Image (spheres, rainbow, N blue to C red):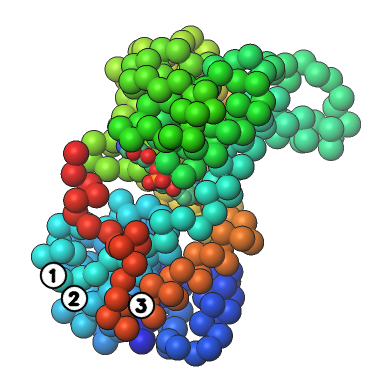
Amino acid sequence: MKVAVFSTKRYDRISLSEANAAGMHTLEFFEPSLGERTAALAADYPVVCPFVNDRLTPEVLEILSGGGTRLLALRSAGFNHVDLPTAERLGLTVLRVPAYSPHAVAEHTLALMLTLNRKVHRAYNRVREQNFSLDGLMGFDLHGKTAGLIGTGKIGAIVARILLGFGCRVLACDPSPDEDCLRRGVEFTDLPGVLSGSDIISLHCPLTPATRHLIDERSLGLTRPGVMLVNTSRGGVVDTQAVIGALKAGRLGSLAIDVYEEEADLFFRDLSDQVITDDVFARLLTFPNVLITAHQAFFTTEAVGAIARTTIGNITDFQAGRVRAENLVTCAMIKG
Ligand code: NAI
């Protein structure tokens, strides 16, 4: 099938071309992200392959559908960037990669926690400048602390196992508690229970209408003073303004994020010679106790290869008139 790949980076070109080595499909790589101004590029492509910050708004979906697109083959697990009711109305099939390497994201979550706690990023810079002072680098033992997980799906369950290995007590909330987590001693409670009982809170739920701004001023008011918040799920789960307020008030002890509400205009590109016009993000960058990575939690050799293989498999399945139920994205998944 003819596939229009948007937001293409060098690694997408390599991994998708490798996965398509048999030449089953004709891949056209577009570097621009998908939006109203670029959607026309996909005219006559029955398959569009977007990434996480491509905007599949009702307007964009109308243009794609009008141009003959029938399948959206997402190269991601998250699907919050697709207006699903419109996709359904237009008869567009939406397939995703529900699991490529939950380990990649879980391990990055731990990298953020450890780096932020032990200030490895600051120590690295100091030592390179021959500043061997330890002032300001004090962290805390992870052992014996209580970590709270919001969401114990594929990623959250692995984070739970790793944290148990560190000797943490692990609290969690999830409408469908993970059986393996329960067996291993994770204590399931409700959201207020996780917020009020944890020294570290880590987010692993999807972004849906129900989870948008789950972490807001109200929920931050329930947390322990000095709590560490880690977000590798989706930026919109956190109200960034509320988090900045909590950081300024000292209630939030530290913050690590791999995702940001307005990341679409920032992440996945080199803006080092430009002025950042997003004042909220610019404020976040000024805090010594905030650590930011630019949506790289998924970025391992294993995960990128698996994303490409599943994406090409999804397109091949669709061409053959079958889809894997677990890869299908439907409106029912955003209800509740
Ligand atoms: P999953 O679907 O396996 O698990 C999500 C879990 O969240 C489910 O168990 C669900 O019941 C739970 N959940 C839903 N609403 C909830 C709520 N209100 N409170 C608590 N739990 C709730 O998804 P997976 O693979 O674990 O991924 C989680 C999220 O991580 C994805 O939705 C995606 O947004 C994000 N992600 C981020 C990546 C990155 O590079 N930073 C890469 C891959 C995923």
Query: Distance between the Cα atoms at labels 1 and 3?
Result: 20 Å
Mark 1 near ligand 1 (CB under 8 Å)?
no
Residue 45: image quadrant is bottom left
Q: Which mark is residue 90?
A: 1
- Residue 52, given in percent of the width and then of the height, sits at 40, 57
Q: Nearer the viewer, mark 1 or mark 3?
A: 3
Identify residue for label 2. 65
Q: Label 3 vs label 2: CA separation? A: 20 Å
Query: According to the image, label 3 marks what residue?
Result: 317
Residue 310 as seen in the image, left or right of residue 71 = right
Cβ at disc 3 under 8 Å from ligand 1 = no
Which is nearer the N-term, disc 1 or disc 3?
1
Up-down: is 164 above or below 314?
Answer: above
Residue drawn where x is 77% and y is 30% of the image: 123
Judged left or right of residue 125, residue 90 is: left
Q: Residue at x 61, y 60 (%)?
A: 302
Q: Name the quadrant where ligand 1 sits.
A: top left
Q: Quadrant of the C terminus?
A: top left
- Find numbered disc 3 in the image and state the secondary structure of the residue it sits on: helix
> Does the rendering let one see residue 65?
yes
Q: Can residue 279 be seen in the rendering of this structure?
A: no
Residue ID at (30%, 32%): 175
Q: CA distance from mark 1 to mark 2?
A: 7 Å
Q: Amino acid at mark 1?
A: Leu
x, y (%) of residue 203?
44, 33
Q: Nearer the viewer, residue 160 or 182?
A: 182
Q: Amino acid at mark 2?
A: Ser
Amino acid under disc 3: Asp
In this rendering, position of residue 23 left or right of residue 52: right
**Label 2, residues with CA under 10 Å away: few <14, some 14-19, many ≥20:** many
Tell me where residue 279 appears, x and y as whole percent.
Answer: 41, 37
